[in-house]
Image (tube, rainbow, N blue to C red):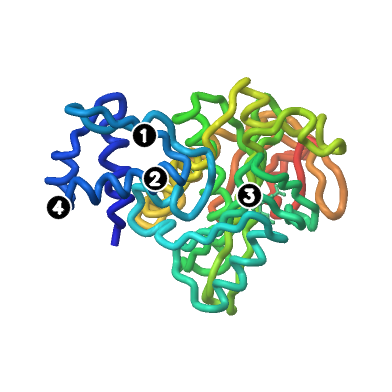
Amino acid sequence: MESTRAKIINLLSSNQDSYISGQEISNQLQISRSAIWKHIKELEKDGYVIEGIRNRGYRILQSPNKVSENTVQWGLNTNWLGKSIIHKESTTSTQHIAHDLATNHADHGTVVIADEQTAGKGRLSRAWYSSKNKGIWMSIILRPSIPPYLAPQLTLLTATVLADVLKKELKLNPKIKWPNDILLQDKKTSGILTEMQAEQDRIQYVVIGIGINVNHEPDDLAEDIQSKATSLKIETGKSWNMTELIQQILLYFEKTYEDFLDKGFSVIKEKWESYGYRIGEVTSIKTFHDVQRAVLTGIAEDGALLAKYEDGTIKKVYSGEIDW
Ligand code: BTN
């Protein structure tokens, strides 16, 4: 059940820039004027700046840039994703918490968010730098009814979700570098780590870890990645509200995931390829065995990268890195 406070936030958010009277809130939510006033005071404690003017009503002047279970849930317009949110100020890795919760029957759509990770995990056993309050460090628990071999599609789906939010909501020009890096101006701003617990033919759960460098200044990025990484703030010159960004990501994710279950992977594949970094170009592909030059032609239904090698053969690449 949506809380009264969430309903007040929703009402005020849908009337941005104009006032909504206490009477109207009272009518819509069937609560007294003094109850509204108490809720408004609680919202202010959570960092909302709300203007109240006699005979006009209330309006939100500023939403908090403080991520918490409440701030993310208020104004979150999803049906099932993020109905349960666990927020930690500091943790080793949101992946660890999500795995623990998932093995203890956490619901499909549970979201774990941290302000800071002390042992953030990246792909290929790398570390993922997750400094405090600078970025979005979040893991989503899913229980999809797809066969385990199709799980990589969920990584590609997530990449299209992040690219869509950056393009449509932030008006940026993101690229997806196979399989899961989101680039801005050829530098990595976001990564995705998908981990799964499965039996031979059935997924028990999937944890999708999303890391986004949001409000980092250049010096906030670890020295060894400074030449290859960036943040939304570095690219746009302004700070972003992480609560709103998380809400948008969850909303786009839910919609895209439902489309994927309804219509299959083809829509995701097409979108992924439209964002694909160096698709149609010659690049170097590093696998476990070697580094070879090939033209990237797209992605396959099972999430593999399709590469056309110099001898004309087209092969699927399941694990490796491009642009090496
Ligand atoms: C990569 O590009 O190598 C993947 C990075 C994934 C980072 C995220 S941050 C939230 C979640 N928790 C982790 O420890 N890792 C993922």
Secondary structure state at the residue bearing disc 4: loop
Q: Give how far across and how far down residue 78 sits, in percent.
A: 36, 51
Say which of marks 1 and 3 sits in front.
Answer: 1
Quadrant of the snapshot with the N terminus: bottom left
Q: Is residue 188 above or below residue 156?
A: above
In the picture as drawn, the residue positioned furthest to the top comes out as: 237
Q: Give how far across and how far down residue 206 sits, in percent.
A: 56, 65
Pointer 3 or 4: first along the chain: 4
Q: Quadrant of residue 319?
A: bottom right
Q: Residue at x 83, y 41 (%)?
A: 292
Which numbered marker is on residue 30? 4
Q: Give how far across and how far down residue 44 sits, in percent.
A: 41, 42
- Spatial CA distance of label 1 from label 3 is 25 Å
Say which of marks 3 and 4 sits in front.
Answer: 4
| Amino acid at the residue labelled 1 | Ile
Secondary structure state at the residue bearing disc 2: helix
Which numbered marker is on residue 43? 2
Give whichever of 42, 173 is nearer the camera: 42
Please say if the residues under marks 1 and 2 sit with CB atoms less than 8 Å apart.
Answer: yes
* Residue 169 can be seen, yes or no: yes
Does label 2 point to a residue whose CB lies under 8 Å from ligand 1? no
- Spatial CA distance of label 3 from label 2 is 20 Å
